[in-house]
Image (tube, helix red, strand yellow):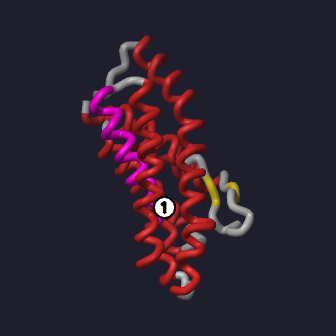
């Protein structure tokens, strides 16, 4: 069972990395450097199928691979991506694990997106924006007008994309007697 779990996590991490590497879409016109990528989809699927810690580990592998191959925003961007993904998939996976089902998946992803947005506010304010050289007097406005809306949109888009795919995938896996838990 452990080998099946590791193989599944590896496949999901590879998919997550490929999505992050190839598809990045700017969402906020005032901040074109903030780009949405659907790489949280495999992270969320991993958290739902294998548990929240697996989803977080998948996100860590994705962020590390991205840093070493394409990390245009350097270690700060990869660390921020990992932290935001870890909060998002961790919350979503924990809620889903407590009571598996479509409703729990939706609630988990919505609350995970909100938690991600709230968690990233102090991380941006006290560390990341300063690391990028943005003056303190501009940081709060940037968080309110670009970063928080971006994270909310990222959570909403990831939820909208993941939910139908996960429901279809979980039905197909159940039909074939495939269980990872």
Quadrant (top left, top right, bottom left, bottom right) of the N terminus: top left
The single residue placed furthest to the top in the displayed view is 175
Q: How many marks?
A: 1
User: Is 89 part of what is drawn in magenta?
Assistant: yes
Tag 1 residue:
81
x, y percent for residue 101? 39, 23
Left or right placement of residue 94 versus residue 73 in this view: left
The answer to whether 128 is drawn above or below residue 37 in the figure is below
The front one of 170 and 138 is: 138
Quadrant of res 83? bottom left
The single residue placed furthest to the right in the displayed view is 29
Left or right placement of residue 149 versus residue 64 in this view: right
Quadrant (top left, top right, bottom left, bottom right) of the C terminus: top left
For the point 66% across and 52% down, the residue is 23
x, y percent for residue 30? 72, 68
Q: Mark 1: few, some, or many residues within 10 Å (few <14, many ≥20)?
A: some
x, y percent for residue 128? 47, 76
The answer to whether 85 is drawn above or below residue 75 in the figure is above
User: Is 57 part of what is drawn in magenta?
Assistant: no
For the point 40% across and 38% down, the residue is 108
The front one of 40 and 28 is: 28
Q: Dot 1 lies on which element?
A: helix
For the point 43% across and 26% down, the residue is 103
Q: Main secondary structure of the magenta part?
A: helix
x, y percent for residue 143? 55, 70
Q: Magenta part of the protein: which range?
A: 80-99
Left or right placement of residue 16 versus residue 27 in this view: left
For the point 60% across and 51% down, the residue is 153
The answer to whether 152 is drawn above or below residue 120 in the figure is above
């Amino acid at each position: 069972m452990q080998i099946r779990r590791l193989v599944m996590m590896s496949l999901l991490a590879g998919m997550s990395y490929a999505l992050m590497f190839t598809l990045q879409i700017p969402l906020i016109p005032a901040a074109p450097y903030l780009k949405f990528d659907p790489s949280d989809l495999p992270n969320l699927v991993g958290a739902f199928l294998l548990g929240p810690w697996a989803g977080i580990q998948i996100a860590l592998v994705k962020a590390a691979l991205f840093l070493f191959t394409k990390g245009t925003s350097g270690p700060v961007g990869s660390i921020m991506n990992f932290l935001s993904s870890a909060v998002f998939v961790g919350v979503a996976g924990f809620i889903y694990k407590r009571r598996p089902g479509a409703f729990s998946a939706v609630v988990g992803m919505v609350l995970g997106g909100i938690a991600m947005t709230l968690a990233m506010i102090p991380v941006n304010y006290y560390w990341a924006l300063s690391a990028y050289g943005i003056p303190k007097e501009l940081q709060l406005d940037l968080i309110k007008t670009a970063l928080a809306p971006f994270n909310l949109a990222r959570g909403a888009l990831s939820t909208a994309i993941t939910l139908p795919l996960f429901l279809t995938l979980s039905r197909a896996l159940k039909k074939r007697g495939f269980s990872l838990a």
